[in-house]
Amino acid sequence: YNAKVVDYGPESLMLRVYGASEKLDAVIELLRPYGLLELVRSGKILMTRGVDPT
């Protein structure tokens, strides 16, 4: 999926994935069993690092 780890910690992981909508849907379904705390689908975005959801 060509995902890149943007940030990580003992209890969190932030990935950057881009591409067609179908590709993003597949990545989301792949990660869903691990528990998604926050998900953003957009153009260029900014997310804070760490565990606390915004």
Image: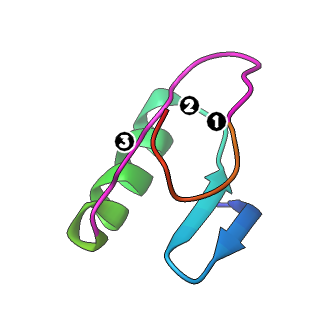
Q: Are marks 3 and 2 in contact (CB under 8 Å)?
A: no
Write down the quadrant of residue 45 in the picture.
top right
Q: Rounded to the nearest whole Å, what is the CA distance between mark 1 and mark 3?
A: 10 Å
Residue at image coords 68%, 71%: 8
Please report contact status of discs 2 and 1: CB closer than 8 Å, yes or no.
yes
Residue located 49% across and 32% down the image:
54
**Quick check: 18 above or below 46?**
below
Label 2 vs label 1: CA separation? 4 Å
Label 1 CA crowd tier, 10 Å (few <14, some 14–19, many 20+): few
Residue extent of the magenta highlight? 35-47
Identify the residue at horizontal 56%, vertical 31% (top origin): 20
Residue most toward the left? 33
Q: Nearer the viewer, residue 54 or 2?
A: 54
**Is 30 within the magenta?**
no
- Between the residue at mark 3 and the residue at mark 2, the CA separation in whole angstroms equals 9 Å
**Relative to 39, 50 lies left or right:** right
Specify the farthest residue to the bottom: 10
Q: Position of residue 47 (x, y in %)?
A: 68, 34
Query: Where is mark 3, residue-wise?
Result: 25
Q: Is residue 36 above or below residue 30?
A: above
Of the image marks 3 and 2, the number of the one nearer the N terminus: 2
